[in-house]
Amino acid sequence: MKNESRNLTQKKDPSRNESLKILVVGATGGTGKATVELLLKDGHNVTAFSRSANSLSFNSDRLSTINGDACNAEDVDRAVNGHNVVIVTLGISDNPFRVRLFGTKHTPMNVRSAGTSNVIKSMHKHGVRRLVAQSSYGVGDTRVLLSFADKMFFNLILHPQIKDTEIQENIIRNSGLDWVISQPVHLTDENFDSQPFISSKGQANVMKVSRKSAAKFLVDAACNSLYNRKSFAISGMSHASV
């Protein structure tokens, strides 16, 4: 099983060495926060956008925060203007069983598709070309690659959220932008920040990956045009694959 990260990260792309202005939409979620941290560490100018973006505690003069609602087109438009790249890490943080039984507490069920649609409209308006979005393994062509247990979990518990994620992916693929879709397997809060296993063919190595490792791919994709207009399965790396 081939890890494409080795080839892609070794190829030279001049844009990878530039300091970019990058907007992170959904910046206070687990992966969003890890992405902001890595972007700052790499020397980029970052704008964090979420309903509580000013809660981020990173001490950097290259970080700006905008409190706003991704489902509000005016909020999003205000945030997108002036950036080179947009990274979308929208999602629902509530317990999935609770969401299935009682609905979400505060976040709309269609936050992924509605928020991403607003982002794309504003990107076209302001001439921003590169979009990197986090989706989920098991959406689209990777659905058939799920285990039986994961298929049951998707169908019985995650169905409404996965349906909206499928809409989100379709919007991105038809956006006309230079897009990249990340499809991570089960995300964890483990403190691992190693390079993940990456496959454009939907292959997965270890069926869990830390949010910090998933963020590594988002940051690399934001700064590397070699990923453009492809989706990548993101999974954990086994010792045998290192």
Image (spheres, grey):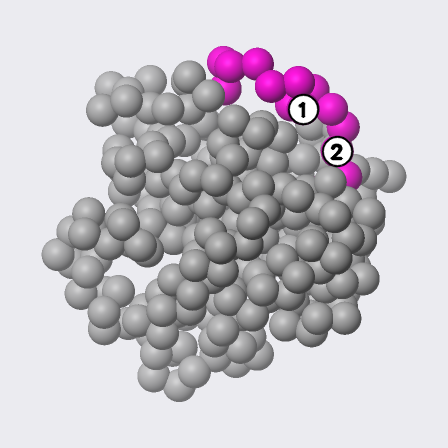
Q: Looking at the image, is 135 positioned above or below residue 43?
A: below
Q: Which residues are magenta?
A: 9-22
Q: Which mark is residue 85?
A: none
Residue type highlighted by circle 2:
Leu
> In the image shown, does 95 or 224 lie closer to the viewer?
224
**Does dot 2 land on a helix, a strand or a loop?**
loop
Residue drawn at (27%, 48%), measured in percent from left and top?
142
**Mark 1, residue position:** 15
> In the image shown, does 91 or 132 lie closer to the viewer?
132
Residue type highlighted by circle 1:
Ser
Decide if residue 102 is in sight here.
Answer: yes
Q: Looking at the image, is 53 positioned above or below residue 183?
A: below
Q: Looking at the image, is 31 positioned above or below residue 240?
A: below
The quadrant where residue 182 appears? top left
Residue drawn at (32%, 69%), measured in percent from left and top?
158
120 relative to 77 in the view: left or right? left
Image quadrant occupied by the C terminus: top left
The quadrant where residue 118 appears? bottom right
**Mark 2, residue position:** 20
How many angstroms separate mark 1 from mark 2 (CA)? 9 Å
Q: Looking at the image, is 178 positioned above or below residue 69?
A: above
* Mark 1 crowd level (few <14, some 14–19, many ≥20, 10 Å Cα): few
Nearer the N terminus, badge 1 or badge 2? 1
Is label 1 or label 2 in front? 1
Decide if residue 190 is in sight here.
Answer: no
